[in-house]
Image: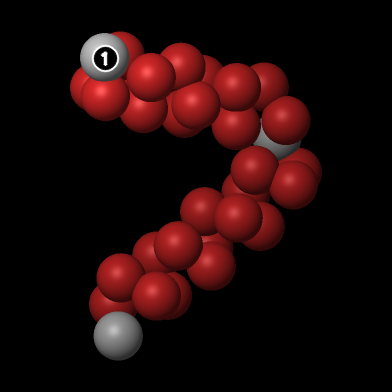
Amino acid sequence: MEISKLITTGIYRWSRNPQFLGFYLSLLGNISS
């Protein structure tokens, strides 16, 4: 599935860019709040 591939690619990017992971988590926090 495209979604599965996108998530996997995102995880690899996060592992290489920790600050991007923090940005994504803050973005999710804003959406869920």
Q: Nearer the viewer, residue 12 or 33?
A: 33
* In the rendered image, the vertical position of residue 32 relative to residue 12, given as above or below: above
Question: Residue 26: image x %, image y %?
Answer: 46, 17
The image quarter in which residue 7 lies: bottom left
Q: Does residue 31 appear to the left or right of 27 in the view shown?
A: left
Question: Residue 17: image x %, image y %?
Answer: 70, 34
Question: Residue 9: image x %, image y %?
Answer: 53, 63
Q: Nearer the viewer, residue 14 or 27?
A: 27
* In the rendered image, the vertical position of residue 26 relative to residue 5, given as above or below: above
- Looking at the rendering, in which quadrant would you find the C terminus? top left
- Looking at the rendering, in which quadrant would you find the N terminus? bottom left
Mark 1 lies on a secondary structure that is loop
Question: Residue 4: image x %, image y %?
Answer: 39, 75
Q: Does residue 31 appear to the left or right of 19 in the view shown?
A: left
The image quarter in which residue 32 lies: top left
Write the residue at 40% across / 65% down.
Answer: 6
* In the rendered image, the vertical position of residue 13 relative to residue 27, given as above or below: below
Write the residue at 62% across / 49% down.
Answer: 13
Residue beneath disc 1: 33
The amino acid type of the residue labelled 1 equals: Ser
Colour pattern of the rendering: secondary structure
Write the residue at 28% across / 77% down.
Answer: 2
Q: Residues within 10 Å of mark 1 (few under 14, many from 20)?
A: few
* In the rendered image, the vertical position of residue 6 relative to residue 33, given as above or below: below
Looking at the rendered structure, the number of numbered marks drawn on it comes to 1
Q: Does residue 17 appear to the left or right of 26 in the view shown?
A: right
Q: Does residue 11 appear to the left or right of 16 in the view shown?
A: left
